[in-house]
Amino acid sequence: MTPAHALVLSLAKRWLSDVLPPSVKQELAADFSIAEDVLANHPVASAWQENTRLQQHWDEILEEPPADPALADALRQTLFEGRQVEVDYRKQGATQQARLHPFGWTQRNGVQYLACTFWDYANPRWLAVHRVQAVTPLDAPARPPLTPEQRAAFLDRSPVPATAAHGAVIALDVEFQSALYDAIRERPPRGTQKIDPPADGWFRLRAEVPDTLGLRWWLLGFNAQVRILQPESLKRELQGLLFDRLTGLVNRHECERVLQRRLAETRRTHQPLSLVLLDLDHFKQVNDGFGHDFGDRALKHVAQCLSQTCRTMDLAVRYGGEEFLILLPNTTGSDAVVIAERLRGTLERTPLTLTPEAMEHHARLGPDRPSEVRLKREGEALYLTASLGVASETGQTAGELDDLAKQLLDRVDKALYRAKHEGRNRVCTDDGALAG
């Protein structure tokens, strides 16, 4: 995966949780349930194809309808639009330079595509004409949109697509990638520094924009990169970025980002945040005695129990190995203990059916099979148990969020260790309290 590709996925990930309008967030549920809902339960973006939601989305993003009818029509076909989310200001001479990373969705012939463009070191005049803002929308001066004639003149000569008014970037047509490369190869813009063929799916161009409309739109170190991803490809890549491939739960890397955001909310609102760290008891005996495939099945079984037991606002995470972490927002330590005890009981009472392959593996080991004294087995079913640690934060602790997150994770890890030390299959808190 190229650095640019990784950045695209990072932006899409941020968009899922940060850019959506608040009213739509409330409809689909908050934070990661948005990503989980869109990626796991629906075709990509299908929830957005309803006309009312689409109109609501654009009403909130655009301050006013663009004057260009063709542009307005194109916007109506655009399912998602993300404006700049990272800006890096630098000075070179007297020219202010900004790095912009806009991206967007478009729909052609009933199929959704993601198109991403990267612009580096854009001249302020170019930004003004294109309505791409190197500052926040509140700081940006109001400017009239391009006229249809101006837009047509620009599209006729520009090596890159025009952008929408009000800082929105229109996604590229699915056929634009190869057509753009062919056109530039036949008629390269003046000052072109580099043209790379799209061998890896990315189209790259470094150039300056030609003089049009009596203006010189110079791009200093201009770099445009475009990739068209079909929905299933994007879905797989986003799932790999956000979710654990085996269990389907949020992965550890993404959990760390969410935890910091939750802690920031806790500090701001003084609403408690609790963590529950769950570790399967005697998992090595399960893995060695019944095979690694059955061990994977056991981990999926735990994930399913968590998904069925956790509340909508909770976040279940595959934290690593046989460890699972649950984030419980707006939950006191005592309430978290109750939830943890419910999770422990659900897992203990839910049978995990032994597969024929697991039974065969177990029989094949003979006298060399690991001890099963501590595994509860009834016929062709195992009943797993887990130890759980609980720790809470009320927002009163001073310090950086990074340090606060580490401290909270250390506390819940110590609570889990105490539960293991006290005999397993129980819930302990970081202050020594015991439940179950």
Image: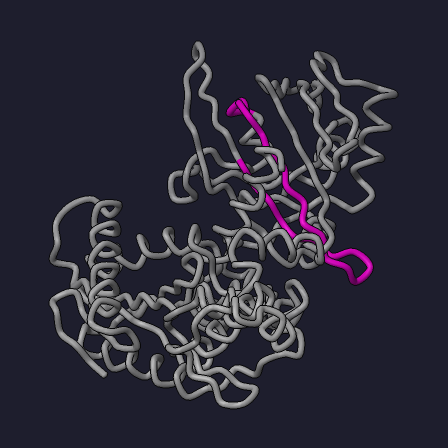
Q: In this view, does 90 lie to the left or right of 1?
A: left
Q: Nearer the viewer, residue 399 or 281?
A: 281
Picture coordinates of residue 253 (x, y %)?
Answer: 43, 50
Tally of numbered tags: 0
Residue at (72, 15) in percent of width and height: 192
- Residue 158: in sight, yes or no? yes
Q: Which of 2 and 378 is in front in this view?
A: 378
Q: Nearer the viewer, residue 303 or 128?
A: 303
Q: Is residue 38 above or below residue 176?
A: below
Residue at (64, 20) in percent of width and height: 215
Please tell me in which quadrant of the rendered image residue 110 appears. Answer: bottom right
The stretch drawn in magenta includes residue 71? no
* Most distant residue in the front direction: 367
| Quadrant containing the N terminus in the rendered view | top right
- Residue 74: in sight, yes or no? no
Q: Is residue 419 left or right of residue 398?
A: right
| Quadrant containing the C terminus in the rendered view | bottom left
Q: Is residue 380 left or right of residue 418?
A: right
Picture coordinates of residue 365 (x, y %)?
Answer: 58, 68
Picture coordinates of residue 390 (x, y %)?
Answer: 23, 68
Please tell me in which quadrant of the rendered image residue 349 appears. Answer: bottom left
Please tell me in which quadrant of the rendered image residue 270 appears. Answer: bottom left
Q: In this view, does 66 lie above or below 317?
A: above
Picture coordinates of residue 48 (x, y %)?
Answer: 62, 67
Q: Which of 372 and 391 is in front in this view?
A: 372
Residue at (75, 23) in percent of width and height: 196
Region rendered in magenta: 101-125
The stretch drawn in magenta includes residue 124? yes
Q: In this view, does 221 lie above or below 104?
A: above
* Most distant residue in the top direction: 93
